[in-house]
Image (tube, rainbow, N blue to C red):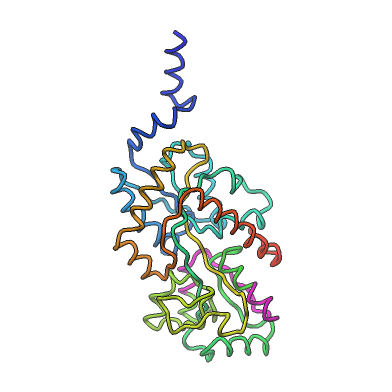
Amino acid sequence: MRRLVCLGLALCGLIPISGPAFAQTWPDRPLRMVIPWPPGGANDILGRSIAERLGARLGHPVVVDNRGGSNGVLGADQVAKARPDGNTLMFHSVTSHVTNPAMIARLPYDTMTDFAAVSVVANVPLVIVVNPREPMRDLSALIARAKAEPGRLSYASFGNGSPSHLAGELFNRRLGIEMQHVPYRGGVPALTDTIAGQVPVYFASLATALEAINTGGVRALAVTGARRAPALPDVPTVEEAANLPGYDMVVAYGLWTTAGTPPPVVERLYEATRAVMQEPSIIERFRSQGAQDIEARSPAESARIISGDSETWGRIAREARATVE
């Protein structure tokens, strides 16, 4: 009788099902991939690319669910509180995720303990773009204008406390200038207003801005990584153009699931993700969006990357005194 009761509890989800046994039959239904940003931005573009192919590898669809708000907090909270069975995933900027503890007084979850890392898959640099009607044709001209008009030149970001915001604040501090921050709710609205001339400068994700750069909607002045972006080989780095040694701001993107998910399920998710990231069509898709270092890292390596980014970007957020309401 006791065995029957215990079995009934396990089937009802009231006690954990053993990892190996569960992994043998997982997945048995469609999966959900939460993207905690609005549609159209880098998270959405890259996440959807993976979701379609991941579903094919796992034998069940991976349904994308955009849950934007509060620098990724609203969507991430749903994943943190989901049942730990591997059926709820999150594709998210590592940078936004790990800086939130430094900027938000009361997070509803712990970014380091309430999620299980599946795989960090790529880095995407930011790119400083301006409206093409602006007279600033290179980064030196932008810096000169910012110094001549302290506090009057503004720059857009894709969210308060986002990598875009922090890259702009570090740029301000390193150069001793005072560009004013204008936060938007996502990359697409910020890009739209930059194209329209509502804001002159935008620290954009290369994945979001690349098409507008190539069609002349905005002018690219510099990329924020330590090396030039293959997608924009003629555009200098900030280090080159502004003589700022060590300025290196790239955004890592990765896949998580809920903490407590059986390790064999996490490993299966990783293996499927690794296979997806080796597909030529996915590599080309990521490259076309300006991604670099396109490779699925193991859960253990991904956890180390996330921990390192938490320390680096968290320090920048604290120094910039950035906050998210």
Spot occupied by residue 243 in the image (x, y as percentages of width and height): 61, 84
Spot occupied by residue 98 in the image (x, y as percentages of width and height): 59, 55
Residue positioned 43% across, 24% down in the render? 12
Left or right of 29 in this view: 195: right
189 inside magenta stretch: yes
Question: How many labels, in total?
Answer: 0
Spot occupied by residue 49 in the image (x, y as percentages of width and height): 35, 58
Left or right of 106 in this view: 41: left
Spot occupied by residue 102 in the image (x, y as percentages of width and height): 67, 56
With respect to residue 159, does 58 lie above or below?
Answer: above
With respect to residue 194, does 111 lie above or below?
Answer: above
Q: 17 or 297: nearer the eye?
A: 297
Question: What's the magenta region?
Answer: 170-192
Q: 306 or 150: nearer the eye?
A: 306
50 inside magenta stretch: no
- Indicate the quadrant containing the C terminus: top left, top right, bottom left or bottom right: bottom right
With respect to residue 312, does 223 lie above or below?
Answer: below
Left or right of 251 in this view: 208: left
With respect to residue 136, does 195 lie above or below?
Answer: above
